[in-house]
Amino acid sequence: DTAVSQTPKYLVTQMGNDKSIKCEQNLGHDTMYWYKQDSKKFLKIMFSYNNKELIINETVPNRFSPKSPDKAHLNLHINSLELGDSAVYFCASSQLAGVSTDTQYFGPGTRLTVL
Amino acid sequence: AQRVTQPEKLLSVFKGAPVELKCNYSYSGSPELFWYVQYSRQRLQLLLRHISRESIKGFTADLNKGETSFHLKKPFAQEEDSAMYYCAPFHTGGFKTIFGAGTRLFVKA
């Protein structure tokens, strides 16, 4: 199956913990993204990597640290989790970076609940 | 500031009725515009994009530069159209896609 996959699908954890979400794409794309979807379904970009290099870094607390070991993987590590981090996190990929006509392909999402 | 507005959080129509999901953008230059859809329990996916001038699942969207709008339309809504719809202009200055807040479409039988 060619797709964007994320693990885990659900993540429930306590405040203050550190957790990671993994994303992999086998579409051969050069660019990957992390989005946060809050409880009101508002979707906001957090980070974007092109060929393992960070190209977009929105105003995100530095408790969030993306890591791209290769262009097919983009992981998101979150330190000292807070209640406000509860959301659905979507990974996405596209063929090129900064190309206006490029379609993004989304992962299924990871629902993070911080208690 | 670059901004996209979807004024309706929820739109409820009867099956067979026309539907229009509104999208207005505030951008310098000419952005490329997309509509993405998220069906229940499915991942977000591209519905259509302005540059392709296509009609997908009966939906079309016309870019009106004068009104800075990119409304999504379908003449006869179907129950399977019930989903969350996001208008998404591509911000060429920031090399990123900006997503609107989304409109939930509910098509009633």
Image (cartoon, coloured by chain):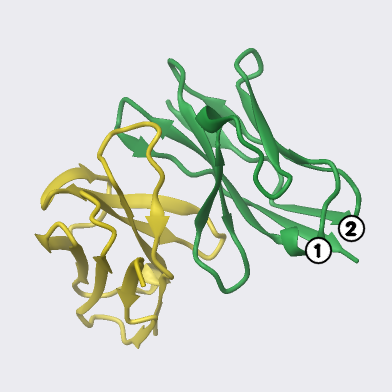
Residue B51: horizontal and vertical position, in percent?
A: 51, 28
The answer to whether any part of residue A51 appears in the image is yes
Mark 1 closeness class: few <14, some 14–19, many ≥20 residues within 10 Å: some
Between residue A70 and residue A36, name the one nearer to us.
A70
Q: Is residue B74 above or below residue A36?
A: above
Residue type, label 1:
Glu
Q: At x 60% / y 21%, what residue is drawn?
A: B68
Chain given the colour green: B
* Chain under callout 2: B
Give the Cα distance between marks 1 and 2.
6 Å
Q: Is residue B102 above or below residue B80?
A: above
* Residue carrying label 2: B15
The answer to whether any part of residue A63 appears in the image is no
Instruction: Give the structural element (helix, strand or loop) at label 2.
Output: loop
Instruction: Give the structural element (helix, strand or loop) at label 1.
Output: helix
Colour of the chain lettered A: yellow
Q: At x 40% / y 40%, what residue is drawn?
A: B97
Q: Quadrant of residue B20?
A: top right
Between residue A59 and residue A56, name the one nearer to us.
A56
Is label 1 in contact with label 2 (beta carbons under 8 Å)? yes
Mark 2 closeness class: few <14, some 14–19, many ≥20 residues within 10 Å: some
Q: Is residue A12 above or below residue A37?
A: below
Give the quarter of the figure containing the N terminus of chain A: bottom left
Could you tell whether B29 is left or right of A57 in the image?
right
Q: Do marks 1 and 2 share a subunit?
A: yes
Between residue A64 and residue A4, name the one nearer to us.
A4
Give the quarter of the figure containing the C terminus of chain A: bottom left
| Number of callouts | 2
Residue B96: horizontal and vertical position, in percent?
A: 34, 38
Q: Quadrant of residue A76?
A: bottom left
The label number, if any, that marks residue B43 in the structure image: none
The label number, if any, that marks residue B79 in the structure image: 1
